[in-house]
Image (cartoon, rainbow, N blue to C red):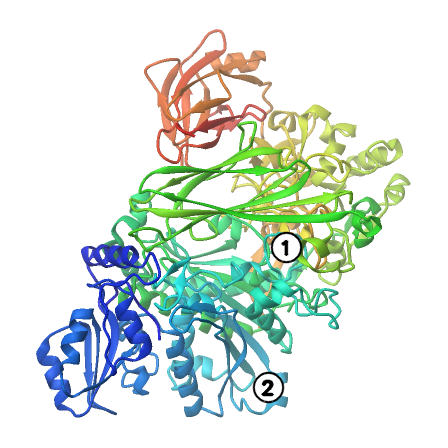
């Protein structure tokens, strides 16, 4: 019943075969009814005959032929036809092969040939119920990916063999793909499998701890399902002895969501809008299945959140009609998994394009306590250790990918086909470059009181398991993927059976924090509750074909007064090529500004969040004609589909009504970042102490450490004096978020030297409700450049940068606020020493002003950790109180010298924190530079002239000594023969350093050519200026600039 159409044998195929077959399939199947021949035979099953008649002449259809007697097998073998040939005489004489139409005719001429069936799948004889190599053969013995119906039947087979340890059942159906053969929609089953000892003892089952694995939320990312079904079989037949010993107390649950995306590969359905394209598809009928979960915080109005509690979130109402119609499988999934008790750990398996890591673990974007952070981190550490031992297998997989996929190989984009490491784990933004909303892992991880599951959960990504390359089946690669995910299942199950606890040792020291009601957000604050206004959501889809290695544009109009806009450029199969393209993209506003851009290839990956591309959110979009530019990076055509959703409020104030936007009423909530400190109660030797601004002003602070996350009281002299007294008397003051605005107001020697002009509030602050969200805000709050030797970053991973998760706090992407301090001003303390732990955009985002280089007390600063919730975007399912990442938690604990001690089953496995506080002194430099750019916008290939002028004496001295440089995007060509360029250095962060000759007057000039490739359109950051101080390059804050490039012909 499937069409494995394009290509793929049971052994690795050549690149020539791959390109030939993929081109043939896509070209002939572009329209319904396209056929290489018309063949009819009463022995041909209906689906098989349809496949023959709706594929090109040379296309090989997976075929099962049953014969009347064994002589038919010999006669078939004598024909020497077909690919991936397998024959059997048990339980009936039969042969499997991939046959072209002409070959099928030859076989049909055999008098003993009785029936012909379309038979896609891993096991060539699954339709016969014959499993000589296992129900789900190992990938090296399989002829293709596991088929949807093959999986259903195989799971039922295993259940019949092991009824005391396995239960399988259907929890619902998807919307279904339209069947061109039967002229109807085919809803298919959402399957769940439970594996444990005495599975039918439901009372005992309810009490057991449960671990869950989801294999196919994205239908074109096959590695998860391939691993899950094989793991189930191996476990039941005794080949996973370590996991089997856990099943008295542990139940494993396997879910197979998104049947639409899985079944899209069959010839009677369309895939990506192309009937008979025979490709697995990413999402379900309603779009991306992994954006449809009802999480607290920001919900993109273009998504379709599946909340079974109904429009009123009360359990008595029905979900919105469009949700019931379009995403029934997501609804059924949410409803079913809410019924489980003691569901504690799990993973949602995915696939990605190219990466320097073979497998990546992506942490959930949730509100996590200290223990929850460490539970997830320990689970990832175990997986990392186990997968690293599999080094040979994942390197082999990379080599296989290079041989198979030719122009789809990541080496074309400058990345090695062979991953550099087995595993990495991080939040999504750090790992694969994006953040978003509606993810399964986030819904399963959030607390139960928000309708979530409170699990230790993550997404796992597998390299080369994606639509790019046409879902090519290769035994070696799929085998490595299966083994990696089976190892992950094994480690997660074992980890779940352990007891992970983490204490925070303070050495008797105490923690206080300053509260304010100004950071509290409640659902009662929302303007639509007292308004007769109306929220309007408009969705449109625009499309154009993009030739190989070409550029195209799509234009669309946006009305005035729109609250927000979501733009999702999506590349789909087109023309004579049945794979989704990969592209660079840029979004240009009516005034010509490039407001969003996406570069396909980064330093360590290829692709973005969906089929290699990205989703953009724009607040208060300009009225007028917008332009989307896409540059195809493949030597093959693709189809660009741009989904544009705009939302506006008509007379309803700044807050859109979620009932109008997505069909759900607002869940009541109260959100306060101070919940973080309340959750630390019981974790420290002494519970944190809350102080009001007034109590601080009265001198009532008695704790060793005081954390301030806001600038309330900035005009209260008594409060400021009390903070000065606290620091001068030996207290340790920690300022985060907008509390940095207090630095200029403090008189303590450790605070001196920072003026109000030295503090930059990027993005909207809690005191500026009317300020544009996009004004200098960040995609996410992060430390850009780390000083790994600084004690504030002690025991964090080198890759960790993200400080807090945005979506659960109501922030859309590009809306994250940070408060940053000029680096030179920060270093200019009149007492003690200043040291920088990290910078963002050349400004200090983490640093310390301490009494001495070996004294941990004084004033510490972190630019963003605990912002208040952001209520401007729709958030019908409530709001988190805080979203601090594990990295942010480590940094904050390090500001106070607290040590986190992780134990597993009572044994200490890891300590987090610095042993001895020691910093390198950041000597202040009286440096300032101006940047002059000859134009703000350039066309592709045009040359910019950059002039850097010293505006202080020390800056002039630095320039005249030849110790000044500028930093430039790597894609720009610096013209070294002109200007004051002494040399150009390539940096590891994907940029280049332009070093200048000595210039007596303190001015330096250079020229750089804009990129001229298809992906040139976009915004480029120049700077900051750097100065060489004792052999170390130090950036000068406030010296950067942005240049826009618009491709020729736009």
Are the residues at dot 1 and dot 2 in contact (C-beta closer than 8 Å)?
no
Q: Quadrant of residue 843?
A: top right
Which image quarter is the N terminus in?
Answer: bottom left
Residue shown at the point (33%, 75%) measured from the top left: 47
Crowd rating for badge 1 (residues with CA inside 10 Å; few <14, some 14–19, many 20+): many
Percent coordinates x, y for residue 891 in the rendering: 62, 47
Q: Is residue 950 above or below residue 192?
A: above
Name the mark nearer the viewer: 1 or 2.
Answer: 2
Picture coordinates of residue 573 (x, y %)? 36, 53
Q: Say if residue 940 shows up in the picture.
A: yes
**Mark found first going from the N terminus, 1 or 2:** 2
Report x, y in % for residue 767.
78, 37
Q: Nearer the viewer, residue 928 or 334?
A: 334
Query: Residue at label 1?
Result: 899
The residue sitting at the top extreme is 1001
Label 2: which secondary element: helix
Which residue in the structure is indicated by mark 2? 205
Q: Is residue 126 above or below residue 629?
A: below
Q: CA distance from mark 1 to mark 2?
A: 39 Å
Neighbor class of circle 2 (other Cα within 10 Å; few <14, some 14-19, many 20+) is many
Which residue does the image show at 30% across and 80% down from the upper left? Answer: 45
């Amino acid at each position: 019943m499937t069409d494995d159409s394009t290509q793929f044998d049971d052994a690795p195929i050549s690149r020539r075969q791959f390109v030939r077959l993929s081109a043939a399939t896509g070209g002939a199947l572009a329209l319904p009814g396209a056929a290489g021949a018309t063949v009819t035979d009463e022995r041909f099953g209906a689906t098989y005959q349809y496949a023959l008649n709706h594929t090109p002449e040379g296309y090989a259809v997976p075929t099962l032929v049953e014969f009347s007697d064994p002589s038919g097998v010999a006669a078939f073998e004598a024909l020497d036809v077909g690919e991936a040939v397998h024959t059997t005489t048990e339980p009936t004489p039969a042969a499997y092969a991939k046959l072209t139409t002409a070959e099928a005719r030859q076989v049909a001429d055999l008098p003993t040939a009785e029936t012909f069936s379309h038979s896609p799948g891993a096991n060539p004889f699954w339709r016969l119920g014959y499993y000589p190599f296992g129900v789900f053969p190992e990938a090296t013995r399989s002829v293709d990916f596991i088929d949807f119906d093959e999986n259903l039947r195989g799971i039922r087979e295993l259940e019949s063999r092991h009824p005391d340890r396995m239960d399988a059942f259907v929890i619902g159906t998807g919307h279904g793909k339209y069947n061109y053969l039967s002229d109807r929609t085919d809803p298919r089953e959402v399957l769940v499998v439970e594996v444990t000892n005495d599975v039918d003892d439901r009372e005992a089952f309810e009490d057991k701890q449960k671990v869950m694995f989801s294999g196919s939320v994205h239908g074109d990312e096959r590695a998860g399902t391939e691993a899950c079904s094989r793991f189930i079989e191996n476990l039941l037949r005794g080949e996973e002895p370590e996991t089997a010993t856990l099943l008295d107390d542990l139940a494993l649950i396997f879910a197979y969501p998104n049947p639409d995306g899985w079944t899209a590969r069959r010839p009677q359905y369309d895939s990506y809008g192309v009937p008979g394209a025979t490709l697995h598809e990413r999402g379900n009928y309603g779009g991306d299945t992994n954006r449809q979960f009802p999480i607290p915080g920001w919900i993109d109005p273009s998504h379709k959140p599946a909340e079974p509690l109904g429009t009123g979130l009360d359990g008595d109402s029905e979900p919105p009609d469009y949700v019931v119609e379009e995403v029934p499988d997501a609804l059924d999934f949410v409803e079913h998994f809410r019924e489980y008790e003691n569901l504690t750990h799990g993973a949602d398996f995915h696939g990605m394009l190219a990466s320097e890591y073979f497998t990546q673990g992506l942490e959930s974007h949730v509100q996590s306590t200290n223990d929850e952070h460490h539970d997830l981190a320990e689970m990832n550490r175990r997986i990392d250790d186990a997968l690293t031992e599999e080094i040979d297998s994942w390197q082999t997989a990379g080599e296989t990918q290079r041989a198979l996929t030719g122009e789809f190989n990541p080496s074309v984009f400058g990345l090695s086909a062979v991953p550099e490491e087995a595993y990495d784990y991080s939040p999504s933004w750090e790992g694969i470059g994006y953040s978003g909303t509606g993810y399964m892992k986030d819904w399963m991880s959030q607390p139960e009181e928000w309708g979530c599951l409170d699990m230790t959960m993550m997404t796992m990504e597998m390299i080369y398991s994606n639509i790019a390359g046409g879902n090519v089946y290769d035994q070696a690669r799929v085998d490595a993927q299966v083994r990696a995910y089976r190892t992950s299942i094994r480690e997660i199950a074992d980890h779940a059976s352990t007891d992970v606890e983490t204490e925070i040792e303070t050495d008797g020291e105490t923690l206080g924090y300053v509260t304010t009601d100004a950071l509290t957000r409640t659902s009662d604050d929302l303007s639509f509750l007292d308004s007769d206004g109306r929220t309007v959501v408009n969705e449109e889809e625009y499309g154009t074909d993009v030739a190989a290695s070409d550029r195209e544009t799509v234009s669309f109009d946006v009305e005035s007064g729109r609250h927000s806009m979501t733009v999702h450029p999506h590349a789909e199969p087109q023309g004579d090529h049945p794979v989704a393209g990969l592209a660079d993209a840029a979004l240009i506003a009516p005034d010509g500004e490039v407001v969003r851009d996406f570069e396909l290839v980064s330093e360590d990956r290829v692709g973005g969040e969906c089929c290699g591309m990205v989703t953009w959110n724009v607040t208060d979009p300009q009225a007028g004609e917008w332009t989307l530019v896409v540059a195809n990076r493949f030597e093959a055509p693709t189809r660009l589909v741009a989904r544009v959703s705009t939302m506006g409020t008509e007379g309803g104030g700044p807050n859109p009504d979620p009932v109008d936007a997505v069909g759900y009423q607002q869940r009541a909530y109260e959100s306060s970042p101070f919940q973080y400190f309340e959750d630390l109660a019981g974790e420290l030797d002494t519970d944190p102490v809350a102080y009001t601004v007034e109590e601080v002003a009265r001198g009532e602070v008695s704790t060793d450490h005081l954390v301030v996350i806001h600038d309330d009281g900035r005009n209260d002299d008594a409060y400021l004096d009390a903070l000065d007294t606290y620091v001068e008397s030996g207290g340790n003051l920690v300022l985060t978020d907008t509390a940095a605005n207090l630095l200029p107001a403090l008189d303590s020697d450790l605070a001196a030297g920072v003026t109000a002009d030295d503090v930059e509030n990027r993005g909207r602050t809690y005191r500026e409700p009317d300020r544009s969200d996009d004004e200098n805000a960040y995609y996410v709050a992060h430390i850009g450049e780390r000083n790994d030797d600084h004690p504030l970053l002690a025991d964090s991973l080198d890759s960790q940068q993200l400080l807090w998760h945005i979506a659960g706090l109501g922030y859309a992407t590009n809306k994250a606020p940070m408060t940053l301090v000029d680096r030179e001003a920060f270093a200019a303390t009149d007492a003690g020493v200043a040291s920088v732990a990290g910078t963002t955009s050349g400004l200090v985002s983490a640093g310390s002003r301490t009494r001495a280089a070996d004294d941990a007390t004084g004033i510490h600063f972190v630019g963003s950790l605990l912002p208040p919730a952001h209520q401007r975007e729709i958030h019908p399912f409530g709001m988190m109180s805080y979203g601090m990442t594990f990295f942010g938690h480590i940094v904050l604990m390090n500001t106070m010298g607290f040590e986190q001690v992780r134990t597993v089953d009572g044994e200490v496995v890891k300590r987090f924190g610095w042993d001895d506080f020691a910093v390198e002194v950041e000597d202040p430099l009286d440096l300032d530079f101006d940047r002059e750019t000859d134009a703000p916008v350039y066309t592709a290939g045009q040359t910019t002239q950059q002039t850097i002028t010293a505006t202080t004496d020390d800056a002039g001295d630095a320039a005249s000594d030849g110790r000044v440089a500028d930093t430039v995007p790597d894609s720009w060509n610096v013209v070294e023969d002109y200007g004051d360029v002494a040399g150009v250095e390539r940096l590891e962060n994907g940029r280049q350093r332009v070093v200048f000759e000595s210039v007596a007057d303190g001015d330096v000039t250079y020229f750089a050519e804009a990129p001229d490739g298809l992906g040139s359109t976009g915004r480029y950051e120049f700077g900051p200026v750097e100065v060489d101080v004792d052999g170390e390059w130090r950036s000068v804050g406030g010296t950067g600039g942005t240049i826009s490039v618009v491709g020729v012909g736009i």
